[in-house]
Amino acid sequence: MLLATDLDGTFLAGDPEDRLKLYQLISAHPEIDLVFVTGRGLESVLPLLSDPTIPQPDYIICDVGCTVVHGESQQAIQPLQSEIDDLWPGEQVIEDALSSFTGLERQHVPQERRVSYFCDNDVVDESMRSIAQDLSCDVLFSAGKYLDILPKGINKGRTLSRLIEHLGVDPESVLVAGDTLNDLSMYQHQFKGVCVGESEEGLLDATDNQARVFHGTSPGCGGILQAFGHFGFLGHAGINAETPDGVNSGKSDLVIVYHRLPYEEVVENGELIRRRPKSPNGIIPTLLSFFADGKAGSWVAWSIDDPELGPFQTHTEVDTSRYEKLVAARVPLSKDDVDIFYKRFSKEAFWPTLHTFWERATFRDEHWQVFLKVNKMFAERTAEEAAENAVVWIHDYNLWMVPAYLRELRPDLTISFFHHTYFPSADVFNVLPWRREIIGSLLQCDHIGFHIPRQAENFVDVARGVTPLEVTEKINCAPRFLTYGCAVGLDEMSVEIKVNDRSIGLGAHPVGLDLNRVKNALADENIMQLARNVRQDLGDVRLILSVERLDFTKGIIEKLEAFARMLDDHPELKTKVTLMMVCVPAAPGMTIYEELLSQIEQTVGRINGQFAELGWTPVQFFFRALPFEELVAYYTVADVMWITPLRDGLNLVAKEYVATQGLTDGSGVLVLSEFAGAAAELRGAVLANPHHPQELADTCHYALTMSESEAKNRLSEAFEVVSRYDIGYWGQAFIDAVELRRLTKLDKLSSADPCAA
């Protein structure tokens, strides 16, 4: 069959349960061709194509019949579109011809091959119709205020009829649906039709005696569902039997969706075993803490499905001694899936673009299909784990599309998302070929968190380019965050937006540090002895420390060049200072950084060759991952911590250094890129522009020559931030914001239907 439906008041209206039922019905039946027939312009229809909860149309007829395109590509359907174009005299001709009429207000909406106004009924008189006729145009007036001047003979019904003829569709298999006089022409071609409940009286009167037109009693989608039954579409077994089975609710009130399991999996002697992570970052223990005290929950993550290791185990325990009722719900992925989904596509397409290096990105549609498949598997597993009205917390860009699939499967859930990486401005993000799908998915969330206000506001700007939205609440960023003090500062941020009558919360939640992890390292005598040994080996030489992962976003080459410049500008520093650069290798299989490593090694060699003297090496380069505890020893000794990424979502290393120095009553100086998210909250750091070589050199020199009193005062400011807004604060603040959204949803549901909650 073919369903040709108006949008506003019809396909986009009705009881939410009826909408979901109809949408699922269409998605479950690929033999249903869906045609949007609307007065909107094509630009105004595009946001609907980004909403994953709305079925994608096969064809779109818009501009009251003046535009007809394919649903997927939005390219014109020929020769139908050319036939319409040949009839249109042009916008300027129409405007000039009607310029003498008073009471006309131009509709400032996207439109093509038509001119639309607001006006009262008495404005549309015979003289206007005569002018339109002379221009070979028609006048369409509807709902007592909408005036459209259209090409002669063109309307929704005529274009729909031509499309059905062009496609060779049996007219008996067509159902048209509408709710205003604007839709009347669709009922004048002998198609079966429905005027949904609450339709305009004029449309009901005009179709009252048409035997093939059914007048529904339920508004919007409910009326269309009634028509399916009335006309016997999809058989007489009933619509309920044709609707996909729902997903059974699970038992977990909180479900964490993360790409990593909360434990390590290793293969020993051909057997897969689990063990606690050797050096877990602060995020995983913090997330685990929400399941303490016997709280039930699920942790959804992927695991390799290797047939050689035996049958795949979907559910495993995590740590029964600490988290009695927490289970790991494992998503089975093949090694090829992981290679494409994570190591290749996420890192070669999304990672460079998010960090504003779009020219380095590689976009492959076959990889996108794997990404979608994996995200759908995550969503299906999550839907089965979550209890009714549960909270789901999804983590990072690898799982961008999970909300889209999950919202359709479980509309009852409160879905939250935290974006751990940087979120760029619209002119960068829009480079992504799948930006509409990604944003459409994220807009299915109830709360979305970012590190800092700038990233949240970037998201709003990107979303605004995808769909109409309303900012319903804003707050000042000060004093929690810097406003005009750095490149990523902002004075005001949006904390709530409304899209399609759904309110979505936005938050700035910079990840904090696990201070106990630093304290434990400082309490280790072996670590303290290592620190003393390093200081003794350095003697009077001052240590500049740099710790980062091998990545082009970290500005490693730029930092090395700035160090050489500083030695050139200040020859008195020769033999007095050394740069220790710890560069952590990328994950195994990541070959895209091999050229970068070669460039770094060549630059280090050149600098040491130029400046080295007997007994003094300017740059000490370590290409390996050091245990966290050893890093703390170096943090203790370093006079300057030099962290200058070209772009970074946050940067926890900066906080680790501040915490170490603060806990040991040190006077070290943090030099931090103003393009790192942490720059917006770490007061006391010396900020630098990593894109300005001279400034990089000058700020490093300033840190080296700073007085001890200024250094201690700066450190005190930064340490206050790090110690107050720790990892526990981050987790609780985020979950509190999400819980507030959940309670608000339940209150609205309860008000609408006292029995629903």
Image (cartoon, rainbow, N blue to C red):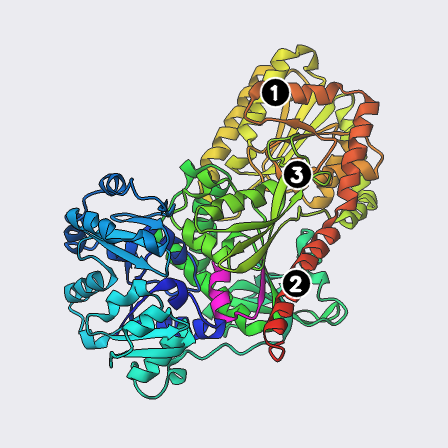
* N-term-proximal mark, 2 vs 1: 2
**Range drawn in magenta:** 400-416
Q: Alpha-carbon distance for marks 2 and 3?
A: 32 Å
The circle drawn on residue 695 is: 1
In the image, 21: left or right of 267?
Answer: left
Q: Which amino acid does label 1 sit on?
A: Glu
Q: For this view, does 530 lie left or right of residue 601?
A: right
Residue 275 numbered mark, or none: 2
Q: Which residue is drawn at 78% across and 38% down?
A: 719
Q: What element carries label 1?
A: helix
The residue lying toward the viewer, choosing from 273 and 6, is 6
Query: Are the residues at dot 2 and dot 3 in contact (C-beta closer than 8 Å)?
Result: no
Which badge, 2 or 3, comes first in the chain's sequence? Answer: 2
The image shows residue 495, relative to residue 648, as above or below, that is below
Q: Give the residue type at disc 2.
A: Arg
Which residue corresponds to mark 3? 678
Give residue 393's position: percent from left, percent from top: 60, 61
